[in-house]
Amino acid sequence: MNKSIATIVLVLIFTGPAFAADTVYHIFAHGMACRYCAFGVDKQLREIEGVKQVDIYLDKGLINVRVKEGTRLTEGQIKTLLENAGVTYQRMEHHPLK
């Protein structure tokens, strides 16, 4: 019985980071008219340390960016990145994932 409890405790200690909460950012932008524009934005976002996933929806003007726990995207950072890609920043929301 004691070995079982010790094993469970060790598993929880070493797998704890796997249950850490990521964050998803919903970025609304205007001006991504084609896949080429979206590819440029996608590439720049993926170069940011901590970015795990980028999904772009051209028809909605929406970019979803999932980042690792502890990674924070700032409005200024995203606005500059989009402006450099020729896209107009509108707004950004973020939500922790559970």
Image (cartoon, rainbow, N blue to C red):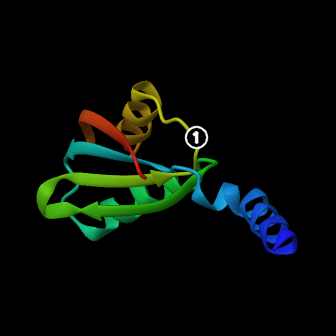
Q: Decide if residue 86 is in sight here.
A: no
Residue placed furthest toward the front: 1
83 left or right, relative to 12: left
In the rendered image, residue 35, in percent from the top left (x then y), is placed at: 28, 69
Viewer-proximal residue among 72 and 39: 72
Give SS at disc 1. loop
In the rendered image, residue 19, in percent from the top left (x then y), is placed at: 58, 58
55 left or right, relative to 33: right
**How many numbered callouts?**
1
91 left or right, relative to 75: left
Residue placed furthest toward the top: 76
Quadrant housing residue 12 = bottom right
Viewer-proximal residue among 14 and 48: 14
Viewer-proximal residue among 68 and 11: 11
In the rendered image, residue 14, in percent from the top left (x then y), is placed at: 78, 61
Residue that appears at 22% across and 63% down? 57
Residue that appears at 75% across and 68% down? 8
74 left or right, relative to 30: right
Crowding around mark 1 (Cα neighbors within 10 Å: few <14, some 14 to 19, many 20+) is some
**Viewport quadrant of the N terminus:** bottom right
Q: Decide if residue 7 is in sight here.
A: yes
Q: Is residue 69 above or below residue 75?
A: below
In the rendered image, residue 40, in percent from the top left (x then y), is placed at: 42, 59
The amino acid type of the residue labelled 1 equals Thr
Quadrant housing residue 60 = bottom left
Q: Is residue 59 above or below residue 92?
A: below
Residue that appears at 29% across and 36% down? 93
Viewer-proximal residue among 7 and 46: 7
Residue at which label 1 appears: 71
Residue that appears at 80% across and 74% down? 4
